[in-house]
Amino acid sequence: MSGISMPQQKIDALDTGLSEAEKEDLEKMIGEFRRDRSQDAPGESREPIQAQMDRLSRRLADLSERVLRSDRQMADLVEVMRLSHQKSELLNQRLDAVIAALKKGRML
C-alpha cells in the first residue's frame, strides 16, 4: 500500500484532457474572476444592505411607537375596567346585604 490515501489516488488519476498550459490559463482566469468579484462585491452589496438596514430601522421605530401608543390606550382601558369591576363588586355587596336583611325579616 502506498502513502497516498485512496481518495487522493482517485483525484490524481482524474484526467481532464487539458494540457498544463490550459490548466494554468484556467487557474489564472478563475483567480482573476475571484479577485474582480471580491473587489466589486463589497461596494455593491454594502449599499443595498445599508439601505435595507435603514428601512428596517425606520420600520422598527414606527412599530415601537405604535406599540407604545397602544400600551397607553390599554392602560386607560384597564383602569376603566378596574373601576367598573370595583363598582359592580360594591353593588353586589350592597345587594347581598339587602337580601340578607330581607331573609331575616327586617328592612334596612
Image (tube, rainbow, N blue to C red):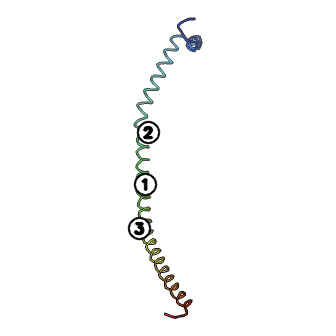
Q: Position of residue 98 (x, y in %)?
A: 52, 88
Q: Position of residue 8 (x, y in %)?
A: 55, 13
**Residues under numbered marks 2 and 3 in contact, where contact means CB atoms less than 8 Å apart:** no
Question: Which residue bears the numbered disc 1?
Answer: 60
On the image, which quarter does residue 73 sit in? bottom left
Front: mark 2 or 1: 1
Going 59% across and 13% down the picture, which residue do you hit? Answer: 10
Going 47% across and 26% down the picture, which residue do you hit? Answer: 33
Q: Position of residue 67 (x, y in %)?
A: 44, 61
Q: Is residue 101 above or below residue 77?
A: below
On the image, which quarter does residue 78 sit in? bottom left
Secondary structure under badge 1? helix
Going 55% across and 91% down the picture, which residue do you hit? Answer: 102
Question: Which residue bears the numbered disc 2?
Answer: 45
Q: Residue furthest top?
A: 1
Q: Position of residue 30 (x, y in %)?
A: 48, 22
In this rendering, position of residue 75 left or right of residue 8: left
- Mark number displayed over residue 28: none
Between the residue at mark 1 and the residue at mark 3, the CA separation in whole angstroms equals 18 Å
Secondary structure under badge 3? helix
Secondary structure under badge 2? helix
Looking at the rendered structure, the kind of residue marked 1 is Leu
Question: Which residue bears the numbered disc 3?
Answer: 72
Q: Residue furthest front?
A: 104
